[in-house]
Amino acid sequence: MNRYLIPSLAIGTLVFSAGQAQAAQVTIDDFETGFQTVQLGGKGMTSSSTMNGLNQIIGGEREIKLTVEESEFGTNRGASVDVQNSLLTVSNDAGIESETVITWDGPGKSGLNADLTGGGMNGVFSLDIVSVDLQALVTLAVTDSGGDTASLSKAALSEGSTVFNFNTFNNAMDTDFSDVESISLTVGGPQEVDFAADSLVTTVAPVPEPLTILGSGLALGFSALFKTKYSRKHQKAQHKN
């Protein structure tokens, strides 16, 4: 192989490989199945709902637990959590502060026994947020088969894909993301928080678009450069002969 083309091929291969790695994506929940509704009013109240036998959800089970932590108007107003129309929606009335915990841990006590890294390729959770109040607080937590738990919280969220990098989780070094027993998503914050999401997956760390374009441009640029140098060198060698 022409030695002048090796650097450009290496860059091109790197960019191409990053795109191909998307095949390792692990879907936690796309909220397209398992219709659920939990509604509450009154401080200190808690209600749960569990759906089983859902093949499209990791572990086949989704549990939703809603707790009203503050209520300025008694039981006249409340909070609700819905899974329908391919959306997870959390909504609080005025004067209501609540906490919603969605848990995926498989049926009974079996656990997930799931490799969220997709064979070592995935490095982030991606939560696709459809709408959100800026004050909402979202926490993701994973517990591995050894009982170690890692978690990461984010606030000041916006619409679009929000990335939770495995390496930035608290206790990430001691938690095995390739052997996970349970996953939880907690949505809370001040009063009147509203939140909606349509999927939660693990995937490869996203490559920023400008870098991808730069990488492709560099690959083409290096290729053209080395081809030109090789052509000139080859022409000089012919003239000498």
Image: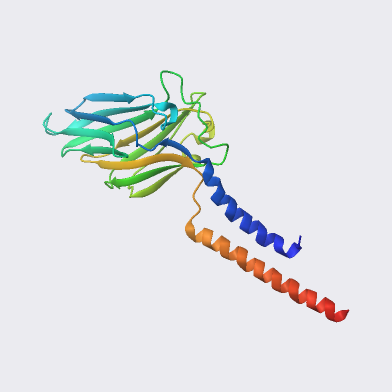
Residue 188: x, y in percent? 29, 37
Image location (x, y in percent) of residue 220: 61, 66
Give the residue furthest to the right.
241
* 194 relative to 161 in the view: left or right: left
Question: Where is residue 150 drawn, in percent x and y?
Answer: 46, 33
Q: Quadrant of residue 121?
A: top right
- Is 234 drawn above or below residue 123 in the view shown? below
Viewer-proximal residue among 218 and 16: 16
Q: Determine whether, in the image, residue 8 is placed left or right of residue 135.
A: right
- Residue 224 drawn above or below residue 206: below
What is the residue that sits farthest to the bottom in this orientation? 239
Q: Is residue 222 above or below residue 80?
A: below
The quadrant holding residue 199 is top left
Quarter that holds the C terminus = bottom right
Render colour scheme: rainbow
Task: Give percent across and percent down for residue 238.
Answer: 84, 78
- Please count the marks in the image: 0
Give the residue displayed 68% in from the left and 60% down from the top. 7
Residue drawn where x is 41% and y is 21% of the image: 107
**Quadrant where the N terminus is found in the figure:** bottom right
Left or right: residue 182 compared with residue 2: left
Query: Residue at horizontal 49%, vertical 61%?
Result: 210
Nearest to the observer: residue 52 or residue 49: 52
99 or 4, which lies in front? Answer: 4
Left or right: where 48 falls relative to 167: left
Name, please, the residue furthest toward the top: 109
Taking the spot 60% from the left edge, 64% from the top edge, the residue there is 218
Q: Quadrant of residue 185?
A: top left
